[in-house]
Image: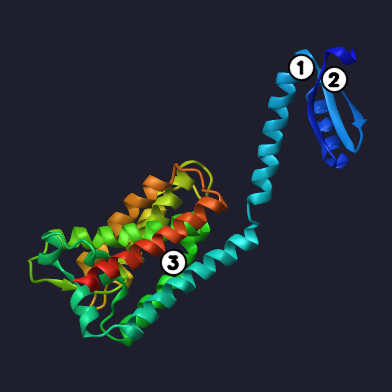
Amino acid sequence: MSASHESAVRRGADERAVRERALVLAAAGIPHRMVFEGEECVLLVAAGDAAAARSMLEEYEREIGASAEAPSPARQGAAAAAAGLAVAAVLIGVHAVADERWYGAGRLVAGRVQAGEWWRAVTALTLHADVAHLAGNAVVAAVVVSALCRTVGVGLGLWLVLLAGAGGNLLAAAWRPPAATSIGASTAVFGAIGALGALAYARRRQGRGPGRRPWVAVAASLALLALLGSDKRADLPAHLAGLVCGLAAGAAAAPLPRPGPTVQRALTLTAAAALAAAWLRALSG
């Protein structure tokens, strides 16, 4: 290559980084050479190859950037477990501080939701009738929320739980008499179960999950509904509504690429903000 017809495609003081990029060009069959200008190492290619070389190096740098940003499976699992425990902690915390005012402002009342008090569909998910009701939902929520967050990431998983739970409450309120009331995280728990079922169905249908019968995942979700919702005090219509909304949310999320860590953090913060905003709206009235 003639020096007068060369272009610098990368330069820097880190010789090792420049050599790595030289290897990328070598693998792509692009002629190149390295020179030193003072303390800088410069990667040169023929002027006619400059555009292709820069494009190749930019793609390489995007890939190594994504690899550096992506957490390890172990860290993803730990984050998912922490998310499940955090949800359980929120349920326990709300139960510890909630008084009659909180229950009056936050419980789901079908007629009030139908009249536009949408926030009750969210706040009701965090209220429980007694310690036994709370304990059951907190334990199951910790397990299924962790499983969902492990599948799609913490931020997206939390949003799926929140949307499925609130959507289930709205759906249940739409067909109930105005005086009907409801509280409890069960609707969101069944929403998470439904989302897991829909995601597993999608993976199996695409050949990315174990087994050859994709309908088994959805059938398992319905079996859990029958098993966990069989208690005489269980709010079966709300559970069913949560499961249906969870199936819909999971189906909508299935074709989406898994968000990266930055987006997951943003989704986590906005999910927490949405819950806080619903309670602020409820208590401000």
Q: Which of these two is toward me, 144 or 207?
A: 144
In the image, is 116 to the left or to the right of 38? left
Q: Position of residue 162 (x, y in %)?
A: 35, 61
Is residue 192 shown to the viewer in this render?
no
In the image, is 162 to the left or to the right of 63? left
| Vertical side of 138 occupied by 158: above or below | above
For the N terminus, the image quarter is top right
Question: What is the secondary structure assignment of the residue under circle 2?
Answer: loop
Question: What is the secondary structure assignment of the residue under circle 1?
Answer: helix
Residue, disc 1 = 49
Task: Identify the residue at horizontal 28%, vertical 77% (top origin).
Answer: 127
Say which of marks 2 and 3 sits in front. Answer: 2
Q: Are marks 1 and 2 in contact (CB under 8 Å)?
A: yes
Q: Position of residue 87 (x, y in %)?
A: 43, 71
Residue, disc 3 = 144
Calculate the distance from the C-alpha at mark 1 to the C-alpha at mark 3. 53 Å
- The numbered mark, 1 or 3, whose residue comes first in the sequence reads 1
Looking at the picture, which amino acid does disc 2 mark? Pro
Looking at the picture, which amino acid does disc 3 mark? Val
Which corner quadrant of the image does residue 88 belong to? bottom left
Which corner quadrant of the image does residue 48 belong to? top right
For the C terminus, the image quarter is bottom left
Looking at the picture, which amino acid does disc 1 mark? Asp
